[in-house]
Image: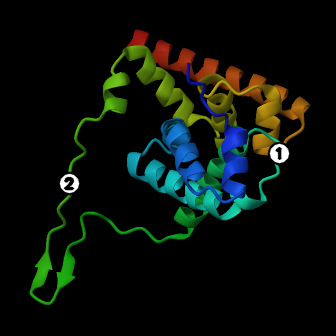
């Protein structure tokens, strides 16, 4: 019977010079990392960029990781920070209308937009309830959205969320409660709108 090597052992192996241990950690955590980043961004490309940046940061910092929290908690914290950095960077970038023509040496050309092909994430979200939940989560303030995702989607404990977000446990509990109330209000509002439509 083959037993799976735990994260802490892989981290130690990497710190002792086994570079393949990082590959194992990335393979183990990349799917959940992407799911978390996608839930934060609601955009496939942005989620991929955030996860890629997060693993670059892991590569740079893993030698100094002391294991004061679980590797997965530390990784979630890094992904969260990458997302927040990405949001800051995006809010400072000027936007260009897609209706504007591109100016080239040969004259102006109309912008071509490539459509998004269906993906597994889209197919999973076809159920009506998932659509309403996704919309409600997207409309939550960022701090509420993050804590709902960490607790309900990623199944993190209060203690893990405390470490990920650097918040006192009391703040985590009260913010999660407020986030749930806000979600309920959004879902009820959506339901009322559907009934009156």
Label for residue 114? 2
Compared to 83, does 154 lie above or below?
above
Q: Nearer the viewer, residue 72 or 184?
A: 72
Seen in the image, is 128 located left or right of residue 9? left
Specify few, some or many for label 2: CA neighbours under 10 Å numbering under 14, 14-19, or 20 or more.
few
* Residue placed most toward the observer, 163 or 89: 163
Disc 1 versus disc 2: nearer the observer = 1
Q: Quick one: which residue is furthest to the front in this view?
A: 1
The N terminus, quarter of image:
top right
**Please, is residue 13 above or below residue 31 in the view?**
below
Q: Quadrant of the C terminus?
A: top left
In x, y percent, where is residue 172? 82, 32
Q: Earlier in the sequence, mark 1 or mark 2?
A: 2
Cβ atoms at labels 1 and 2 below 8 Å apart: no
187 versus 69 height, above or below: above
Q: Which mark is residue 85?
A: none
- The residue shown at (59%, 49%) is 21
Question: In this orientation, does residue 40 appear?
Answer: no
Q: Secondary structure at mark 1?
A: loop
Q: Residue at x 63, y 23 (%)?
A: 152
Quickly name the residue at label 1. 166
Q: Quadrant of residue 180?
A: top right
Residue 65 percent across, percent down from the top left:
77, 54
Q: Secondary structure at mark 2?
A: loop
- On the image, the x and y values in percent for residue 28 come to 54, 38
Which residue is pictured at 62% across the width and 31% down the height? 149
- Colour scheme shown: rainbow
- Left/right placement of residue 137 relative to residue 8 reads left
Residue 189 seen in this snapshot: yes
Q: Position of residue 68 (x, y in %)?
A: 85, 44
Q: Nearer the viewer, residue 41 or 190?
A: 41
The answer to whether residue 44 is left or right of residue 20 is left
């Amino acid at each position: 019977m083959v037993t799976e090597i735990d994260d802490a052992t892989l981290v130690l192996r990497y710190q002792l010079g086994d570079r393949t241990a990082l590959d194992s950690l990335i393979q183990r955590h990349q799917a959940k990392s992407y799911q978390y980043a996608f839930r934060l961004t609601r955009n496939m490309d942005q989620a991929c960029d955030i996860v890629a940046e997060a693993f670059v940061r892991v590569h740079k910092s893993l030698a100094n990781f002391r294991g004061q929290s679980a590797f997965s908690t530390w990784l979630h914290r890094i992904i969260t920070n990458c997302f927040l950095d990405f949001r800051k960077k995006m809010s400072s970038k000027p936007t260009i209308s897609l209706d504007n023509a591109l100016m080239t040496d040969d004259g102006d050309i109309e912008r071509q937009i490539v459509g998004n092909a269906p993906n597994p994430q889209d197919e999973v979200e076809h159920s009506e309830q998932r659509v309403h939940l996704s919309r409600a989560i997207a409309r939550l303030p960022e701090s509420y959205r993050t804590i709902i995702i960490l607790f309900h989607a990623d199944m993190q404990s209060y203690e893990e969320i405390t470490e990920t977000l650097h918040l006192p446990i009391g703040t985590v509990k009260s913010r999660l409660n407020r986030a749930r109330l806000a979600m309920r209000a959004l879902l009820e509002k959506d339901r009322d709108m559907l009934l009156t439509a």
